Amino acid sequence: MPTDRWGLTLPLPGVPLADHKQFVQLAEAEGYTDLWTGETGGPDGFTPLALSAAWTERARLGTGIVGVFQRGPALLTQQATALTDASSGRFVLGIGASSDRMVAGWNRIPFERPLSKVEETLDFLRVGLAGERTETGFKLETAPAHPTPIVLAALRGKMLRLAVEKADGAFTNFLPLAGLPRVVEGIAGAPEGFELLCRFFCIPGEREQVEPLARFMFSSYVTVPVYANFFRWLGYGEEIGPMVEAWEAKDRPAAAAAAPWDLIEDTFLVGPPEAIRERLDAYVAGGITLPVITPITTPDNHAALIKALAP
């Protein structure tokens, strides 16, 4: 099952935003169709895309994802409209609940009813982005000239169903290849054109080179409650149990040591670029319509890895 879309995550690790122009233009020249931002502890999800809108001509620009708790729905509507306008209609708004660690822990905002919060925000956005007046009385000063598709961050059953029912796509993350069929099953009945995006952490190198970093990344992500619940939903509760227990005891080295290597290898894309490409092809064959590549390497190797993993 070939895909006609191929994405790159922005920003690139270790590269200042002001120095991204060469990499963004290289990606577009190499055939990448999409540029998608994350939003964790680095830059916000919108600023790298605003810069990229000026640096590119064809690439689609998406937030993958920005949280609905940290911004009000009217502000999200304004930000999405601004980027859609700046990119002449090349923008996709990816939204999600984010995580309890980021919302409640970092921002001190109650992380309550995430499914309802996402649905309420999505309903607001559909009205606001159409240039119509919302129930709160908000209306854009100028009606948008281009539509803005909306993609939902969706890991498990109910959020996947919401994406199918009300959004234009679903964005998954930290997905083991063996767990892909269950996610695909969760979007059964999706309309034609519905997208299934997934971010892939690509770490080039042999096991002895990449294992310490991979263990740290895996244990710090999958111990976040929303991801721990995702892996339990996929059937890996027993495998991640000791790691989660160690993390909750604040023993980070023990958590990394307890991270199951077989599961790390099935979730991260490690090895030489050729092996990473084979894994990406397997995900596409299994139903991912847009792989979004995150190169985990040093700044001096970004260009080579972007080329090696190009479509």
Image (tube, helix red, strand yellow):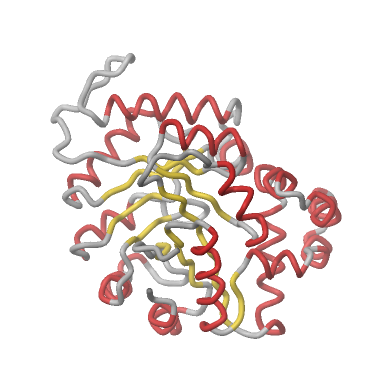
**Dividing the image into 4 quarters, which one contains the N terminus?**
bottom left
Please provide percent x and percent y for residue 229: 71, 43
Q: Residue at x 42, y 63 (%)?
A: 9
Residue at image position (23%, 29%) is 130
* Rendered location of residue 121, percent (x, y): 42, 28
| Residue 129 drawn above or below residue 16 | above
Who's the residue at 31% across and 64% down the image? 33
Relative image position of residue 258 (x, y in whole percent) = 83, 63
The quarter holding residue 29 reads: bottom left
Q: Nearer the viewer, residue 291 or 204?
A: 291
Residue 121 shown left or right of residue 184 in the figure? left
Q: Quadrant of residue 12?
A: bottom left
Q: Is residue 197 left or right of residue 276?
A: left
Note whether 220 is above or below 151 in the view shown.
below
Indicate left or right for 233 with 153 as reference.
right
Residue at 51% across / 82% down in the picture?
A: 273
